[in-house]
Amino acid sequence: MTIKEQQDEIIEEFAYYPEWMEKYEYIIQLGKELPLIEEKYKTDDHLIRGCQSRVWMHPEYRDGKVWFTADSDALITKGLVGMVIRVLSGHTPKEIVDAEIYFISAIALNSHLSPTRSNGLLSMLKQIKNYALAYHLQDVKRETT
Amino acid sequence: MSHTLNIYEPLSIEAIRAEFPILQTLVYGNPLVYLDNAATTQKPLSVLEAMDVYYKTINANVHRGVHHLSQVATDAFEEARRKVASYINAAHDHEIIFTRGTTEGINLVASVFGRANLKAGDEVLITAMEHHSNIVPWQLACEYYGAKLKVIPFSERGELDMDAFAALIKGPVKILSFTYVSNSLGTINPVNEMIHAAHERGIVVLLDAAQAVQHIPIDVQELDVDFLVFSSHKIYGPTGLGVLYGKEALLNKLPPYQGGGEMIRTVSFEKTTYNDLPFKFEAGTPDIAGAIGLGAALDYVNSIGIDRIKLAEEALMEYAQEMMSGVPGIRFVGEAANKAGVISFLLGNHHPFDVGEILDKQGIAVRTGHHCCQPVMDRLGIPGTVRASFSVYNTPEDVDRLVKGLEKTAKMLG
């Protein structure tokens, strides 16, 4: 599934839940499906700054694709990380860097999340894109040398 | 809970709430329950009107103008200063310095007191329950002058260790700077005892009253405190304005903080002389509308009476504590015998952030996190708390909504 298809799928899923409480229950549910980070990576190096709760994220680059694992000590945050990773994990660095992320505003999450929470979400996305960019530049450098 | 409401008689709680238009707000379709008063209080109509009238009818720069409006604006601004002085019973109006807030007040004192008095080997004494704004300015000063920052610890219940205080105050302490009421735990500290002990050794005392002035009657002469700071926006006034009270003799001995207009008497490139109190510490055009707004806010508090507000809030806090105790998994953080305004808690093992967010979706505004008190959270070994904080307009119904909201939150978070 492309990044775009993944986003459309999430938007469709959220349409089943008109009530905000249901949406939150679903977000918490998505957190349970998050590919969990190994305990050994739960270090300060893997912390994402800008979140009120703690979020650890670890990238792995194999077979030309970036795979993310993560965890958080807050359930809602964990659900949000779960969604972001579901959309962006398993794609090439170039795809991730170029991806336009629209599902957050499409499910009106950004207008309902607390400002600290949406800042945290932005930090997460930025961090993922930074990892992808680093892998991409690494590849470009390898190809040119 | 009818006894809480009776405290305000002949005023009704409905009449009080009607003064605060924002309380009619719907949040995600639910009537707002505002329990984040320790962060900032809402503003009564009289404050909004006073500021509106100022801008509509008498706006002009103060103190230097020859024209009519400037005179009227100056009178209104200085009248606000008189109201503040009277509210905390300062001996002189010019002991009231307008600042941008509590934070600036502490920075001012840390900066100029440090410059005049701190040297290598001296100590600055604070408590482990200070807001970051009463830690960092002193760290900066200590670092600059080679002084040491010493910290009075507190117990699991959130009460200061008075034995440790008795030992620490005997050190080469130059200033004791501490909070009257803890913003994260609600603890009311034994201010009289601490000020007395400091003065016995000739140590200057700064009291952070940011979380006290809206809950407890304050008399700076009775307290005999040297400096006292608070913020307008936590006592129903506008944001961006604060008060530094200082004893006249002390303020006169200190160098100026910022340079600029208003704070000078004469300026030449060779030598500048400074203005008298309070203007020496008020460089630049002050927040005139803000001061007038604060004056109106203090009038508002006086119209009800801070003693009555204190009684009503105490009764409400007691009711809240009792009702919240029934929520499965609740754990109170800060169980001092004397508390004001704040109930900090955790719900099971849930992250405060999750609890705050689900409460918000039910229209209930609380604060989550470390409340700018990271050392407090480190001391207690928790990431943060959920904090409900109370004010004149809160009702037992607000508490009931909070309790129901917490029960629903617990169910959702599993």
Image: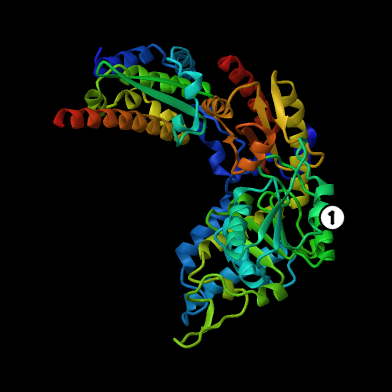
Residue B241 in the image: above or below residue B309? below
B299 lies left or right of A59: right
Nearer to me, A46 or B311 = A46
Residue B100 in the image: above or below residue A118? below
| Percent of width and height locating residue B113 | 64, 68
Nearer to me, A122 or B388 = A122
Q: Is residue B103 visible?
A: yes
Q: How is the image coloured?
A: rainbow
| Residue under the point 63% across and 48% down | B131
Quarter of image, res A120 = top left
| Residue under the point 62% across and 36% down | B35
Residue that mark 1 sits on:
B193
- SS for callout 1: helix
Quarter of image, res A35 = top left
Residue farthest to the left? A144
Q: Quadrant of the N terminus of chain B?
A: top right
| Residue under the point 57% across and 38% down | B23
A127 lies left or right of B25: left
Q: Name which residue type carries label 1.
A: Glu
Residue farthest to the front? A145
Quarter of image, res B407 = top right
| Percent of width and height locating residue B333 | 71, 33
Q: Is residue B389 visible?
A: no
Q: In the rendered structure, the residue with mark 1 lies on which chain? A: B
Q: Quadrant of the C terminus of chain B?
A: top right
| Residue under the point 66% across and 54% down | B300
| Percent of width and height locating residue B375 | 64, 42
